[in-house]
Image (cartoon, helix red, strand yellow):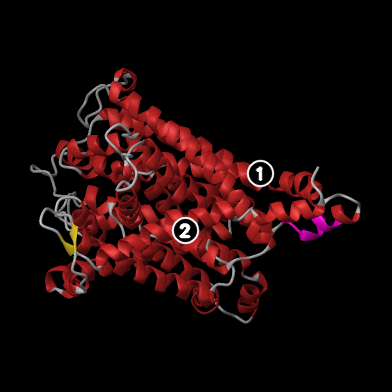
Amino acid sequence: MKTAAGWERLRAWFLLPAWIWMLALFAAPFAIVICYSLLTRGAYGGLGTPWTWENYQRLIDPLYLVIVLKSFLMAAETTAICLLLGFPLALFISRAGSRKNVYLQLVILPFWTSFLVRIYAWLFLLRDTGLINTALRHMGLIHDPLPLLYNDGAVLLGLVYGYLPFMVLPVYATLERLDPALVEAAADLGAKPWPTLLHVILPLSAPGIRAGSILVFIPALGAYLTPDLLGGGRTVLIGNLVQNQFTNARDWPFGAAISVGLMALVGVLVILMLRREREGLV
Amino acid sequence: MRRWLGLYAAAVYAFLHVPLVILAIFSFNASRFTVWQGFSLHWYRAIFQDQQLAESTWNSVIIAVVATILSTIAGTLCAYGLWKRGSALLSGSLYLSLVTPEIVMGISLLALFQWSFRWMHWRLGLYTVILAHVAFSIAYVVIVIAARLRTFSPSLEEAALDLGATEWQAFRYVTLPALLPGIVAAALLALTVSFDDYVITSMVAGVDSETLPMVIYAMARRGASPVINAISALIVVVFGTLVLISEKVRAA
């Protein structure tokens, strides 16, 4: 049995594990990365002095700027397609009545199961000897396999497939909170379903769309596994560039500088989102 | 518009689920090629005879279980502590860790471990992977339990205090039982994200700590094989069940 004062003291320790985590496994690693980004690459791929800004200056080298811009474009396309697929789906779920939860779980289930397995599923379908090419060949529609895999399209498909639930869930959450009386009022005043959707429902679900867009855009921008497996080294995005600096290229300072840049971008996006949404993520 | 919406939703659901269903169907194919040649459990037998798969699965299980226990304890205490007295710095860091690109988290943890090895004669191994998994799964645990706490009224604890309970009793007999479904759901979620992780794990794993996703990745890189289909189907079934249980418990 604890006395009240003893409990107060004990409760003060509740946050301790989290603070240790925050300092030792989150802040400290990143602080080291920041230090590395200001060092020079050593003779054998190690780290050396002098301290320099040069690694950051290399980020605007056209060679790398192209990769950065391509990653942005890819993330923007992913977000747009996710919105196009996800908004109607969220609207459908929010109107499904008693089966809402089942439909919602059908979105969540593949999402939490396994990311790697889901990417592999597309590898299985799209490769030269994959199901789609084999089926088309057996139907006599093609002679040579179509180049479905290892291109930007395959990577885009994989990114949309991977992050679609990030769009559906927040959009659904705002549609769920939407007052049905507003939609009824629009109908009573003579609005047809489509104008109601465009002028009433869509503007009211803007917070969810904004949250969903940021939640899709951020992981798509830093994606590594999807372009690696579905792009087969031909689609290089920021994530692959970072990984390459730490493995094959053995240029840790430059890899660290790209990471810091990426994190700065992500941080700005998160702050923008949290400013708008007081409720927090998801 | 109603019918169009239904059709559209059906198409999106098909997009989400059909690839996984096809993947699973072909794990029962007698042929190693993508042409259906009859039902067979050959590839499932192959899984259980593969030494590398057995070892890596065992590694993954140890890592996932230890990391889940650690992150669930730390995350639960953290969520309760933040609920009592918020800390913008800590919750900000939790959110940030949730959206940190995996590759960035992977290389920064690798940098930390390499840096600390200058003073300590350790090597990359199971425990570095476990530490890394705790690092990325704590935020998930906190989010799930914090969501549960948002629906838990502080007046329940106050009522217990008014009725003569000590603060410890109020926590132990009122708050903790109310949080239990959230804690179970959070632990299952942590288990799933830990078992599945490839990117961060591959950066901080040593030679003796290869995990199942790392083996699957290497096999997928070499070209598809029905063995991967079979493992994938098993993973989907096992973790799909865990996720469903987690959702059920959380809704309870």
- Residue interval drawn in magenta: B152-159
Residue B20 makes an appearance in the image = yes
Identify the image quadrant of residue B246.
top right
> How many residues crowd mark 1 within 10 Å: few (<14), some (14–19), many (20+)?
many
Residue B181, disc = 1
Q: In the rendered image, which residue does mark 2 sit on?
A: A23
Percent across and percent down for residue B20 are: 37, 40
Residue A259 makes an appearance in the image = no
The CA distance from mark 2 to mark 1 is 29 Å
Q: Tell me how many marks there are.
A: 2
Identify the image quadrant of residue B23.
top left
Q: Of helix, strand and loop, which one carries label 1?
A: helix
Percent across and percent down for residue B90 are: 54, 63
Percent across and percent down for residue A233 are: 16, 52
Taking depth in this image into account, of B229 and B179 the one nearest to the observer is: B179
In the rendered view, does A51 fall on the left or right side of B200? Answer: left
